[in-house]
C-alpha cells in the first residue's frame, strides 16, 4: 500500500453521498494504474460492516483531554472492495446506526470528539505499523486536522515526513468548533496555533488548506467558485494557497455503474437503446405510480439547500399548470420541513408527481436508467456524480450552471454537436421552468432527442483519466508507480 485514503465514507461499506462513491472507486483505479492504494473509515454500525469479516491489525487508545478512548484498527478479510480496506473501531464514538446523523435525521452532537478520535487512531496506528503508506490522502473536514497533526503535534512527529493531499469535496461544511474545545486536541507547538484558527474558531477545513502539501477540489470550476465566493469566508485563503490547488473532475466507477450489467435495473442495456429505456421507464413509472407515456423527469439527491431541492415544490405547481405534460419523480431524504412539503405534493398531482422520501440505492439506479431527464437545480455542486450516472444510462441532464455541472454538461444549444443536456443560470423559478420547457420540447423532437441520448451514453466518464491526474500529483511527492 503506497497511498492510504482517509475518509468518513466508502461505498459500499458506508455511503451518505458522493464522497462514499469516490472513496470506493478511486483507489481501485489508482491501484490498477500502478499505485497500490487502501482506504480507512470509521467502523459504523451499518449492515455492510456488520456482515463482513474483519481482523484486528492494531490495538490502541487515544487521549481526549482527561480520558482515554480505546480503539482497534481492523482490516476487511475477504478483499471485498478490491483494495486493502480498513476500519477504525472506536466504541462509544462510531458504533452507531448512522454516518453523520441518527436514523431520525438528527446530527450527532459529539462530532468534535468523534473526528478527533478517528484521526488520531489512524495516526497512532500508522506510527506503530511497519508497512506504513508513503502518502496520506485525506477527504473533507472530518480528516482535515491530519495534515496539521503530523507536522505540529509532538505525539505524531514521527510521521512529519509523510506527504499529505487533501481533497475538498464540499466547502459548505468546515467542521469548525470553538477554542474552548482546544483541550481535546493532542498537544501542539504553540507557534502553530494560527494554523488552526479561522475567524476565531478551530476550523479543520481551513487548517487542511493551510497545512496539506497539495489541495484538490472535485472539479476545476468548483475551485474557481470557492476562490470567488462559495467557501463561506475562505475565499482569500484559497486564493493565497492557489499554487498548491488543483481542480480534478471526479470520475464514475464503471464497474458499478454499467447499464449492461447493473443488477438493480429492470432490464440491462443491449443493442437497442430505446428498448432499454422503455423497459426501465415502465418499471420506474409503475413504482412511482406515474404515467409512462409522459416525458419523465427525476430528481435524486439529498433534500438540502445546496441541491436546490427547495426550488422544486413551487416549480412543480408551475409546470403542472403550464407545460401540462411532464411527470416528475423525486427520490430524496433530508430536511424534515421539505420532506413534509413533498408528502403533501404527493396528494396533489396523481399520475404526474410522486416523491419517495427515502435513501434507496437500487431505486436511484433505476431512476437514472428509466427517466428521460434528470433535474439538478443545485445552488452549488462541487462535482455532482448523478448527472454522470444519468448520462451513462441515457438520461439527459437538466442542470443549473454550477461547479462540476458546468464542467460535465455543455448545453445542447452549443455549436458543433457537443451538447449533453440543458443548462440554466439563475437559481429561479423562471429559469428552472424554462429549462424544463426546453426539455419537453426536446422530448418531442425525437431525432435530436435520440442523438443527444446516444452521445451522452458514449461519453467516457470513467475514473481512468482523473486517476492519472492524482497520480501526477503523487509523483511530485516522490511516489513511483509499479
Ligand atoms: P452529494 O455527495 O453532494 O450528495 P453527488 O452527486 O456527488 O452528491 O452524489 C450523490 C450520491 O448519492 C449518488 O450516488 C446518488 O445516487 C446518491 N443518492 C443521493 N440521494 C439518494 C437517495 N435518496 N437514494 C439513493 N441514492 C441517493
Ligand atoms: C460532495 C459534493 C458533490 C461531489 C461529491 C463527491 O458531496 O457535494 O458535488 O460530487 O462530494 O466528490
Image (cartoon, rainbow, N blue to C red):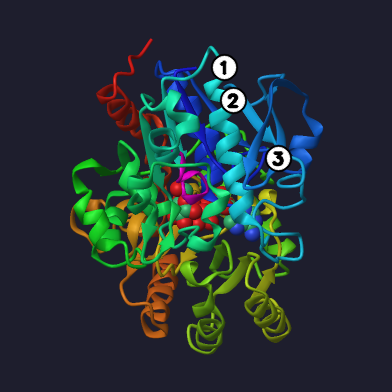
Q: Is mark 1 within 8 Å of ligand 2?
A: no
Find disc 1 in the rendering and name its residue.
Answer: 129
Label 3 vs label 1, nearer the camera? 3
> Where's residue 129, x and y in %?
57, 17
Cα–Cα gap, marks 3 and 1: 19 Å
352 w.r.t. 145: above or below:
below
Residues at marks 3 and 1 touching, judged by CB atoms closer than 8 Å: no
Let me know if residue 70 is in the magenta part.
Answer: no
Residue 479 seen anywhere in this rendered image of the structure: yes
In the image, 200 versus 341, the foreground residue is 200
Query: Magenta region: which residues?
Result: 140-146
Let me know if residue 143 is in the magenta part.
Answer: yes
369 relative to 30 in the view: left or right: right
> Where's residue 457, x and y in %?
43, 44
Instruction: Name the residue rendered at 35%, 14% in the picture.
Output: 481
> Where's residue 162, x and y in %?
39, 25
Q: Earlier in the sequence, mark 3 or mark 1?
A: 3
| Image mark for residue 125 | 2
Q: Earlier in the sequence, mark 2 or mark 3?
A: 3
28 w.r.t. 393: above or below:
above
Instruction: Name the residue rendered at 59%, 73% in the picture.
Output: 327
Find disc 3 in the rendering and name its residue.
Answer: 69
Amino acid at each position: 500500500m503506497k497511498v492510504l485514503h482517509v475518509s468518513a465514507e466508502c461505498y459500499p461499506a458506508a455511503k451518505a453521498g458522493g464522497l462514499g462513491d469516490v472513496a470506493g472507486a478511486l483507489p481501485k483505479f489508482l491501484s490498477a494504474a500502478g499505485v497500490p492504494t487502501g482506504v480507512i473509515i470509521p467502523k459504523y454500525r451499518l449492515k455492510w460492516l456488520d456482515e463482513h469479516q474483519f481482523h484486528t491489525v492494531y490495538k490502541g487508545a487515544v487521549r481526549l483531554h482527561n480520558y482515554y478512548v480505546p480503539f482497534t484498527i481492523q482490516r476487511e478479510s475477504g478483499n471485498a472492495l478490491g483494495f486493502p480496506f480498513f476500519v477504525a473501531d472506536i466504541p462509544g464514538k462510531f458504533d452507531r446506526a448512522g454516518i453523520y446523523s441518527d436514523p431520525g435525521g438528527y446530527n450527532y452532537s459529539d462530532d468534535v470528539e468523534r473526528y478527533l478520535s478517528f484521526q488520531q487512531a489512524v495516526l497512532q496506528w500508522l506510527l506503530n505499523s511497519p508497512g506504513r503508506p508513503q502518502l496520506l490522502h485525506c477527504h473533507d473536514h472530518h480528516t482535515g486536522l491530519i495534515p496539521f497533526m503530523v507536522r505540529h503535534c509532538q505525539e505524531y512527529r514521527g510521521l512529519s515526513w509523510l506527504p499529505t493531499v487533501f481533497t475538498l469535496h464540499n466547502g459548505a461544511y468546515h467542521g469548525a468548533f470553538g477554542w474552548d474545545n482546544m483541550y481535546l486536541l493532542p498537544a501542539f507547538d504553540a507557534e502553530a496555533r494560527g494554523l488552526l484558527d479561522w475567524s476565531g474558531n478551530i476550523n479543520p477545513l481551513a487548517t487542511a488548506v493551510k497545512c496539506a502539501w497539495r489541495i484538490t477540489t472535485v472539479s476545476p470550476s468548483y475551485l474557481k467558485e470557492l476562490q470567488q465566493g462559495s467557501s463561506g469566508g475562505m475565499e482569500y485563503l484559497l486564493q493565497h494557497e492557489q499554487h498548491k490547488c488543483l481542480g480534478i473532475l471526479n470520475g464514475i466507477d464503471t464497474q458499478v455503474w454499467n447499464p449492461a450489467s447493473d443488477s438493480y435495473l429492470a432490464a440491462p442495456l443491449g443493442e437497442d437503446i430505446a428498448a432499454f429505456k422503455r423497459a426501465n421507464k415502465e418499471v420506474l413509472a409503475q413504482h412511482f405510480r406515474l404515467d409512462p407515456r409522459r416525458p419523465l423527469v427525476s430528481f435524486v439527491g439529498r433534500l438540502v439547500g445546496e441541491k436546490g431541492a427547495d426550488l422544486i415544490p413551487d416549480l412543480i405547481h408551475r409546470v403542472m399548470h403550464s407545460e401540462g405534460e411532464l411527470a416528475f419523480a423525486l427520490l430524496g431524504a433530508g430536511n424534515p420541513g421539505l420532506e413534509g412539503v413533498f408528502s403533501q405534493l404527493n396528494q396533489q398531482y396523481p399520475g404526474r408527481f410522486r416523491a419517495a422520501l427515502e435513501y434507496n440505492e437500487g431505486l436511484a439506479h433505476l431512476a437514472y436508467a428509466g427517466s428521460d431527464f434528470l433535474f439538478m437545480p443545485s445552488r452549488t455542486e462541487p462535482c455532482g456524480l448523478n448527472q454522470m450516472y444519468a448520462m451513462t444510462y441515457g438520461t439527459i441532464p437538466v442542470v443549473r450552471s454550477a461547479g462540476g455541472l458546468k464542467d460535465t454538461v455543455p448545453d445542447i444549444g452549443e455549436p458543433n454537436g457537443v451538447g449533453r443536456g440543458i443548462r440554466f443560470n439563475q437559481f429561479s423559478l423562471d429559469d428552472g421552468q424554462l429549462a424544463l420547457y426546453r426539455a419537453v420540447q426536446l422530448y418531442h423532437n425525437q431525432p435530436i432527442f435520440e442523438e443527444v441520448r446516444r452521445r451522452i451514453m458514449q461519453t467516457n466518464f470513467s475514473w481512468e483519466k482523473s486517476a492519472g491526474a492524482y497520480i501526477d500529483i503523487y509523483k511530485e511527492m516522490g511516489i513511483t508507480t509499479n
